[in-house]
Image (spheres, rainbow, N blue to C red):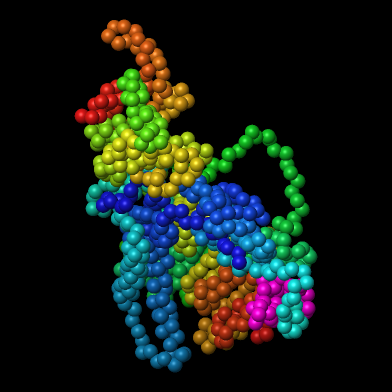
């Protein structure tokens, strides 16, 4: 029985009422799953539902990338026989549309909460003890909850860059970059991971002079080297300056009032770059400020909440999922973990299976990968057989005018086991699903090669790459 | 025709159950109503009865495994009937949702009994190398036709296995039918084949341990509840001693009458329940539950009686004690305690308690510090009744005394009101006739 102000305290015969802290992808998915299993769920969110993904991450960037893609397409329109007579970019409208998309999805999550009868409290949650949580509600009233089970899903925030001047003016994080009022004439992005690369792509398309700086020897260091090489070439062709293996020394005000001066060091040499705006996209850290974990016995290590394979912390009945646990900082991982935590909080005993998590980059061309890179497979001592197929031999890609890129399957020679799959090219982020499924179901290259893929599609390239693993492709 | 035995739903919110043990062996006869297996949910361990009479033909899910509600866990067959399930699916994986495996019905035919089979079916059987006598025919007059042979062949040899695992198995020559699959719906995956191929791991001598009790089921539930209560409610325990002379006398007088009405002997616990109910009705704060930011004074007085059952502590609840007579309390408490000891309490009979009584007197305990049963606000511990010297009017006399230990939640009640409540209980026990006022 739920009374006006919240959770009913745990009674002997009830399923323990469940409290979820954080309404991002990890939290709200766990909430819906738990509600579907019959639990009484309360979710506390201090800002907007949907968390980082919907409000400051995945969704807004994808919306802007679409606008940027349209700009790029219009640039090629003449060659496609569409005689566009010049066009303008209205950044304010672009941002407004992005906000509309976000708001629509946030409302969607709100609807999910109400249709599943999940009680949502807008407020900040703080632990006073292992199973005692005080909520400072948005309407000012305090509320203390005594949940039977808790799932912590407070997510992450941009990590600060420990460099002098990183907190100065016109130095922004990804959060602020999504609220800019105008396209900066020049932009220096620190961090060549997924976030940095996508912002580079967006603002370059919109007319900024973009410089992308990465500390590791190459961009997107966790993805397949050969595949990333194709993307890097495309980014450079677009006019993006990529500096890898570089470390930032300092950020200061430039000579010109409107500029920043960034000093960096590469191969022992110092360089200085001026830019109107600096974007720091050098990683994210778990967000637990004000959560009150110091009042509990929950084990935390370097900011991350420690959990076992069942998403449970060292305190029975207290779970944590998503970015706050470290691990792979992706929304789909948080969602998968959220579902496992929900089932386990209600008495189940599932383990999160994160063996095959696809990673996607929504640049143009798109990049996607799942499993081991070619280098990783070889380092693990596998007898590797690589099957590749380029999009410039694929009818659909050529017809689309987007023939840059390839499909690459990294297989074990003995049985054709798919160890990793990597794509760069049009729709890579959607096409990767076929390969993720194949790996999860232990299909080998042979099964993919023998599956009829429709013609003409981009997916055919996957079939052909599989053919090169088991024998020979037809179209190359 | 085999009858399915499924994991029953024992409560509105139950989604899974763990089979504790089978009470009937595979192949043994079982009668309708006979206890068949024990299930544990997050509330209690409950015995489930067989719904039909027959033979427990096949156990699909072994003890210790957790399956979702309505999953098929066994089959009860008619005598002589044989249930054959496709191999590789006999062990349902611990937390997957098992698909219902169609029972392959085989006909028991007397030797020499004529089997009706079509020529095409016979040919198909010969081609597939299968013995057709056990096949149930679906043709006219129970004739075996070709599709029956094909269906039988498909089911009887189907092993669910991933393509990769199949290749690994083929390369090594291992027989796949015997491998237990860890994939969805019991599918055999690469690691299952690899495990089957791996040489047996030599048993490493471990330090001898006396005994390990798995920390699960009831024990885990009790652990969580006790820890939660202890950590969130500030417990204060008040002790007092009660002169039981008058209560002993009262009981003696009422014994024959109650026995006549109920068939049971009136116990001291019954009288204590009556007395505590009366005291609770006068001290509503002790009959309250703390929920969110409000103290809910409960209308009904539902007394939980702590029972030491085989699997652990269990607290059946005697509802609406305020309006029950001693005879009614006597009947109901006996019923609840018996059920609790037998592990047959229903979730309804363990819920909505407003106050708990725990009696450790039979173990010669005097005082103790009981832990409040959340979300209640107090719990009364009862000690032993023991003859001891006390001072009455300046003289030392021997009286039968009993200790009471009242733990209360200091968030809800303060020391003085709690003490007044305890004093009242003492008063009513020392002068039980006050119950009539």
Is residue A433 or residue B384 the one in the foreground? B384
Is residue B358 or residue A150 the one in the foreground? B358
Left or right, residue B263 beside residue A380:
left
Residue B110's place in the image compared with A303, above or below, is below
Task: Kindly identify the residue that appears in the image at 75 percent across and 55 percent down.
Answer: B198
Left or right, residue B353 beside residue B433:
right
Task: Kindly identify the residue that appears in the image at 51 percent across and 68 percent down.
Answer: A360
The residue at the far left in this view is: B437
- Residue A301: tell me if it is visible: no
> How many numbered marks are there?
0
Residue B349's place in the image compared with A415, above or below, is above
Residue B147 falls inside the magenta stretch: yes
Left or right, residue A26 beside residue A382:
left
- In the image, which residues are magenta? B126-155
Q: Where, by quadrant of the figure, is residue B260 drawn?
A: top left
Task: Kindly identify the residue that appears in the image at 38 percent across and 40 percent down.
Answer: B332
Is residue A126 or residue B143 the one in the foreground? B143
Q: Where, by quadrant of the figure, is residue B386 drawn?
A: top left
Left or right, residue B311 beside residue A112:
right
Q: How far across and how far down the image is residue B315, in percent?
A: 42, 39
Q: Where, by quadrant of the figure, is residue B187 drawn?
A: bottom right
Residue A175 falls inside the magenta stretch: no
The quadrant the C terminus of chain A occupies is bottom right
Q: How far across and how far down the image is residue A123, in percent?
A: 30, 53
Q: How far across and how far down the image is residue A355, in percent?
A: 58, 61
- Residue A17: tell me if it is visible: yes
Q: How far across and how far down the image is residue A327, in percent?
A: 51, 55
Task: Kindly identify the residue that appears in the image at 42 percent across and 41 percent down.
Answer: B336
The residue at the far top in this view is: B395
């Amino acid at each position: 029985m739920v009374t006006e102000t919240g959770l009913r305290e745990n009674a002997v015969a009830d399923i323990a009422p469940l409290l979820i802290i954080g309404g991002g992808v990890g939290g709200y998915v766990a909430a819906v799953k738990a509600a579907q299993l019959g639990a009484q769920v309360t979710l506390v969110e201090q800002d907007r539902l949907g968390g980082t993904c919907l409000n400051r991450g995945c969704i807004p960037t994808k919306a802007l990338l679409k606008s940027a893609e349209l700009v790029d397409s219009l640039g090629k329109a003449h060659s496609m026989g569409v005689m566009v007579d010049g066009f303008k970019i209205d950044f304010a409208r672009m941002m407004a549309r992005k906000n509309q998309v976000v708001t629509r999805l946030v409302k969607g999550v709100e609807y999910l909460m109400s249709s599943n009868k999940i009680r949502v409290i807008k407020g900040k949650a703080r632990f006073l003890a292992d199973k005692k949580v005080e909520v400072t509600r948005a309407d000012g009233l305090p509320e203390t909850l005594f949940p039977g089970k808790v799932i912590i899903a407070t997510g992450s925030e941009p990590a600060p860059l420990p460099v002098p001047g990183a907190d100065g003016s016109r130095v922004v994080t990804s959060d602020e970059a999504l609220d800019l009022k105008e396209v900066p004439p020049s932009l220096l992005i620190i961090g060549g991971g997924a976030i940095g690369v996508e912002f580079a792509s967006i603002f370059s398309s919109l007319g900024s002079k973009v410089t992308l700086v990465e500390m590791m020897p190459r961009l997107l260091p966790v993805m397949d080297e050969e595949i990333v090489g194709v993307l890097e070439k495309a980014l450079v062709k677009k006019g993006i300056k990529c500096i890898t293996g570089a470390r930032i020394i300092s950020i200061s005000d430039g000579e010109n009032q409107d500029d920043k001066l960034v000093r960096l060091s590469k191969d022992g040499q110092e360089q200085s770059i001026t830019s109107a705006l600096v974007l720091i996209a050098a990683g994210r850290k778990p967000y637990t400020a004000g959560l009150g974990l110091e009042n509990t016995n929950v084990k935390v290590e370097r900011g991350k909440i420690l959990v076992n394979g069942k998403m449970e912390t060292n305190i029975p009945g207290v779970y944590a999922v998503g970015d706050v646990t470290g691990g792979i900082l992706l929304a789909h991982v948080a969602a998968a973990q959220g579902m496992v935590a929900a089932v386990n909080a209600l008495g189940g005993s599932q383990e999160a299976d994160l063996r095959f998590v696809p990673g996607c980059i929504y640049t143009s061309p798109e990049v996607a990968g799942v499993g081991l890179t070619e280098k990783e497979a070889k380092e693990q001592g596998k007898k590797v057989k690589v099957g590749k197929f380029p999009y410039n031999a694929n009818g659909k890609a050529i017809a689309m005018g987007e023939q840059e890129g390839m499909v690459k399957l990294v297989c074990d020679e003995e049985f054709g086991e798919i160890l990793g799959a990597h794509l760069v090219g049009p729709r890579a982020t959607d096409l990767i699903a076929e390969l993720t499924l194949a790996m999860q179901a232990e299909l080998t290259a042979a099964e993919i090669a023998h599956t009829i893929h429709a013609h003409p599609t981009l997916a055919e390239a996957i079939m052909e790459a599989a053919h090169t693993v088991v024998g020979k492709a037809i179209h190359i | 025709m085999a009858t399915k035995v499924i994991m029953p739903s024992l409560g509105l919110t139950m989604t899974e159950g763990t089979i504790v043990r089978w009470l009937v062996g595979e192949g043994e006869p079982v009668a309708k109503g006979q206890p068949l297996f024990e299930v544990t949910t997050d509330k209690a361990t409950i015995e489930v009865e067989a719904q039909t009479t027959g033979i427990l033909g096949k156990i699909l899910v072994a003890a210790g495994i957790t399956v979702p509600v309505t999953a098929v866990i066994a089959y009860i067959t008619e005598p002589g009937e044989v249930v054959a399930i496709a191999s590789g699916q006999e062990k349902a994986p611990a937390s997957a949702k098992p698909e219902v495996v169609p029972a392959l019905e085989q006909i028991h035919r007397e030797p020499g009994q004529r089997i009706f089979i079509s020529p095409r079916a016979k040919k198909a059987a010969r081609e597939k190398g299968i013995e057709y006598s056990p096949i149930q025919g679906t043709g006219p007059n129970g004739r075996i036709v070709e599709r029956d042979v094909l269906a039988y062949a498909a089911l009887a040899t189907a092993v669910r296995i991933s393509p990769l695992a199949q290749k690994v198995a083929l390369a090594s020559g291992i027989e796949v039918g015997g491998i237990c699959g860890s994939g969805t719906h019991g599918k055999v995956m690469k690691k299952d084949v690899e495990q089957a191929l791996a040489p047996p791991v030599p048993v490493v001598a471990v330090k001898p341990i006396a005994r390990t009790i798995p920390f699960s089921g009831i024990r885990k539930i009790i652990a969580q509840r006790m820890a939660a209560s202890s950590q969130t409610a500030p417990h204060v325990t008040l002790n007092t001693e009660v002169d039981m002379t008058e209560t002993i006398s009262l009981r003696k007088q009422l014994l024959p009458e109650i026995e006549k009405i109920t068939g049971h002997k009136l116990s001291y616990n019954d009288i204590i329940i009556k007395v505590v109910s009366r005291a609770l009705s006068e001290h509503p704060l002790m009959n309250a539950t703390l929920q969110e930011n409000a103290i809910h004074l409960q209308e009904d007085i539902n007394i939980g009686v702590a029972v030491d059952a085989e699997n652990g502590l269990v607290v059946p609840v005697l509802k609406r004690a305020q309006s029950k007579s001693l005879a009614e309390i006597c009947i109901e408490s006996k019923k609840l305690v018996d059920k609790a000891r037998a592990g047959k309490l229903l979730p309804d009979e363990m819920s909505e308690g407003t106050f708990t009584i725990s009696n450790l007197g039979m173990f010669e305990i005097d005082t103790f510090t009981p832990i409040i049963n959340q979300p209640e606000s107090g719990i009364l511990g009862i000690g032993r009744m023991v003859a001891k010297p006390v001072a009455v009017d300046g003289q030392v006399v021997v009286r039968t005394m009993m200790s009471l230990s009242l733990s209360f939640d200091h968030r809800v009640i303060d020391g003085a009101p709690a003490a007044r409540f305890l004093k009242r209980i003492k008063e009513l026990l020392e002068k039980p006739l006050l119950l009539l006022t």
